[in-house]
Amino acid sequence: MSKRKTNLTRRGFLWRTAGLVAAPVIVPATALGLGGSVPPSERIILGGLGIGNRGSHDLQWMLPEKDVQFVADCDPQKSRAEKVKNIVDTRYGNKDFKIYHNTPEFLAERTDIDALLVTTGDRWHALASILAMRAGKDVYSEKPSSMTVAEGRAVADTAKRHRRIYQTGTQRLSEGNFTFCNEMLRLGRLGDVHTVRAHIAPWDAAEMRHDWLPAQPLPPKDEVDWDQWLGPCPWRPYNPAYCSGGWRGFYDFHTSCIGEWGAHTFAQCQVAIGQQYTSAIDYKYVNNKTGDGMVTTFPNGVKMVLQLEGWRGSCGVTFEGTEGWVGAADGYSQPDVSNPAMLDDFKKLVGDYMARTQRPMSHVRNFLDCVKSRQQTVANAEMMHRSMTTVHAANICMWLKRDLKFDPDKERFVNDPQADRFLSRAMREPWIY
Amino acid sequence: MLKKRTILILVAAALLSPVFSYGQTVVPASKQDELIAVLKSGDATRKEKADACRLLSSIATKEAVPALAALLGDEEMNHMARYALEPIKDPSVDDALLDALGKLQGKPLVGVIGSIGVRGERRAVKPLAQMLKSNDSMVAQAAGRALGNIGDAAAAKALGSALAGSSGDNKLAICEGMFRCAETLGGNEAAAIYDQLRELKDPHQARAGGLRGAILTRKDGFDLLKEYLESKDYIMFSAAVQTSGEMPGAKVTAALTGQLGKLSADNQVLILGALAVRGDAAAIPAIAKAAKSGDKAVRIAAIEALPPLGDASAVPVLVDLLDDSDTDIAQAAQANLAAMSGNKVDAAVMAMLADGNTKTQLTALDLIERRRMTNVGGALLKATKDNDESVRTAAIKMLGDLPGEVNFGVLVNLLLGAKSSAEIRAAERALATTCKREAKPSPGNVTIRKAVYRGIEGGGSADVTKKVAEMVAAGAVSIEASNANFGDAAQGIVKELQIEFTANGVTQTETVREGQSITLLTGATPDALVEELCSAMAKAQAEQKAALLRVLRAAQGAKALESIRAATKDADSEVSGEAISILCGWPSAEVLPDVLKLATTAGENKVKILAVRGAIRLIPLQDASVDKKLAGFKEIVPLIQRDEEKRLLLGSLATVPTNEALAMAVAYLDSAATKNEACFAAVAIAEAIGSKSAAEVGAAMEKVLAAATNDDVKKRAKAVLDKAGK
């Protein structure tokens, strides 16, 4: 519900080409001596890191925002960066958008950029976010936002250290149906909530691949910078399939079917039950390939069940209490409820939430508002890290094929040195944070 | 004797074949020796060694350290050796890394420095301090971060000394190291580090982070916060405001509110946002002042800051602003008042409703609806007697929107006593809304059109339409997708059930996976409510009667239909016309005989047209054989006069795929007004008939091809023709 009028005053609008879509020349915050702090009345200069298919969706949500100017993208894959340039240049009616291929050079050179959209593959989300925040940028990162518990902790610490605004792309935390569910829990309308159910992706498995695809000739570095594409992950020979989404399912690059959607649904569940700043403490192993049916327990006693089926859309969640249940997933025209009368208050509950929290029903807008207000986003770094910790611990439970207990304060497993070994992975030089 | 290479291959094969199988992530601890053997082998491939390192990372002990350490100097294996070494809890790992520190260069050295940082090895401080000056920037930066991880006083001192002469990315790494040291050291040592960082000229993020640390670490941090809340430097000002969110207490709130009115609009907006997040109601008087006058952006930010504080004292502030001359301000106040919870807000809204001012009363009614207020029935009923029609109308509408505030009979009486058309419409809407809300799930009038039980990825499918129809006829309202119900159409594959059905004439399609159920329910308004509506018909004037008929249409059900049928004979043409219109638009086929009768006997042309259109829509909805439906179409054809209804008929003919229907469609090919729809109908029917009537289909498709202008329909006709020819 951000109705605040943006009064763009200081960064002048000089229309370069009459008749074309507005492409203002903007004086960046750095030139005004404002560093990465963008005042409420100013425009935010945005850049991208690794914008692929998913990132293009984010881009389409960001470009229409009137207080945003998208200026550059960095990607080790030239063809992807060129697609992004085409989208942005077409919208702005010029050829000003710049593309880069080397992340450290990009960050060092573009001091004018206030915030970055990080939509690389999973393997780079955390490192890219850390490097960007350390370079003074605010970050909107796609999820799953970390590969290990240690990576997630490093992201959260970096945001805090450098006073950066961070939002992870769990956009359902800014959607009406899911917000309604959360508010129903918060207001006690379901009685005592004892069980929540989190959708996990119906493809891939919790067990992961360790094979290498057959080696293919390495393309020129300016087409695909393979060393950079791999980033902190173990080296393996080049195969073009990895670069077109074929990295999914591999242990080095992916967080399994649990992370694929759990990055969303665990966060949704944890926010709903007020456990977003802790993690599940108990994980019960299930003898199947996906983790379907695994029961995890949070410090407040609420159980979260990982569930493959039971929704009519993706990333579903269901919350069960002593006095009723609610649920939602993508594509629902309205939340599923145990009693239709619950929906009478839909608008009021969502409206109250927006007024109480000052958060709009737009995840991107929430990020942009927070870049200016310097307040915490709805999916901030600490919250991201805690929900991803539950994802990682559930994966480790599946890999070790036994029950686990986790201590969220120490961020270690309880008396389980072998499980602790999976909390971090050595990073490949020089991609170390 | 087997050669060494052969032995290794056999060992690797024996060990790694199961290990490398898809999905294996962990091996038993007993495999360590075999994995070490792979590492020592001169013949093992890079992949084999990498996998050995990865597997060792979860089981390795100090026994594996020598073999792993030997790989640190190998550019290809440095990373994977560290991958296995980092988690081993034994000092021999640190010895090995320290040893490598003095011998390596370039990327392997960067990797080793990183691992030393992860392990926090204090013996490395001295060499790492030296490396801060390295000409290799990767090494210098890695050293800065690693010293930060070690985080003792010596590391902090080394970093602090190197800061002054650093620049660019090296400076970022040193700042990062200093932050990490401060977090480990705490107290005065941390405060000194943070002071050093906040006093830098750049980078801005280190200055801002340094300020946060400096404020939060020291006991007198509040004084520092206050100082920077007056800073002209926006970076440090915004960092101070941001940090205030981590500092509870009235003193901090007062420091923030003290700046309102003194600063630029941007800075005030930032402070108001922080006050909203802090949730300290003590800020309300200052926020109220900011909301009342001044820069518009600041005023709106102030208005938006009030609901998060959740305190009733904010209510009069927002109420006062409802009359603001700036409509943006007034709307913001109304929206935020609507969102505030609590009895005091409710009381303020009720006082507004009792006010004699129409605008205020209408605002109150809007707030009652948006706030979903309860126990307001009496006040709303009073408002329905107000002198102003707009207030009366809004109050009547509200009574329908808020469940349980008044009895259904009260709403009926409001309609009967309505003084104007607007009030009649409002009462009609309130009654219809209530009927729908009170509708209870029931099996209703459900017709199964098609049901299929099939494997989700192919592999078998069964038409279970008949079975589902039998289950519904036997009283089932919920159909489970299960082999028990439908047999196993695709063995070994998860199945899904798809049912296309009509409920009260409305067609729906639902699909569920095996184990789930489709519920075939419709909503039925309770009989008691329908009875009240029917009784009211006798007392109503013509306009009210017409409105009641529309409510009965919303209520649905046999009793409602009976009343509507009776009204078609009402002496007042306004009433009978409305009843006929509703009958012809009734969603289910039970009214088809009435509609056909109207189509054949009505004297008024307008009624005939309505009835013909209704019949064409209703004929396919019958739960009847194709022959019976075809007979219905045949009966209606002579009554069709206009091209519009001819086109409507053609749109429905495909529901009776027979040679006769095909001939009926072909007959319309000659008219330019119906040619296009006739082509589509003929092709759709022909596709369904297929080769059963090859000659008829072939002849019809020849005609379609000659008449059609649409490429898609031509293509389909050609395909049917080809198939019929075979």
Image (cartoon, coloured by chain):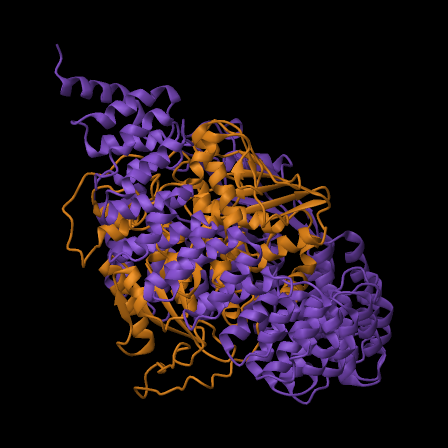
Chain colours: A orange, B purple
Does residue A294 lie above or below B10 as drawn?
A: below
Vertical relation: A406 (above or below) A135: above
Which percent across, then down, holds residue B547? 72, 70
Which quadrant holds residue B531?
A: bottom right
Q: Which of these two is toward me, B224 or A293?
A: B224
Above or below, B331 against B280 in this view is below
Specify whether residue A164 is in view.
yes
Q: Is residue B390 left or right of residue A80?
A: right
* Residue B308, position as x, y percentages in the image: 68, 67
Is residue A99 shown left or right of residue B378?
Answer: left
Q: Nearer the viewer, residue B430 or B100?
A: B100
| Residue B557 in view, yes or no | no
Quadrant housing the N terminus of chain B: top left
- Quarter occupied by residue B319: bottom right
Q: Residue furthest top?
A: B1
Q: Is residue A159 left or right of residue A375?
A: left
Q: Quadrant of the C terminus of chain B?
A: top left
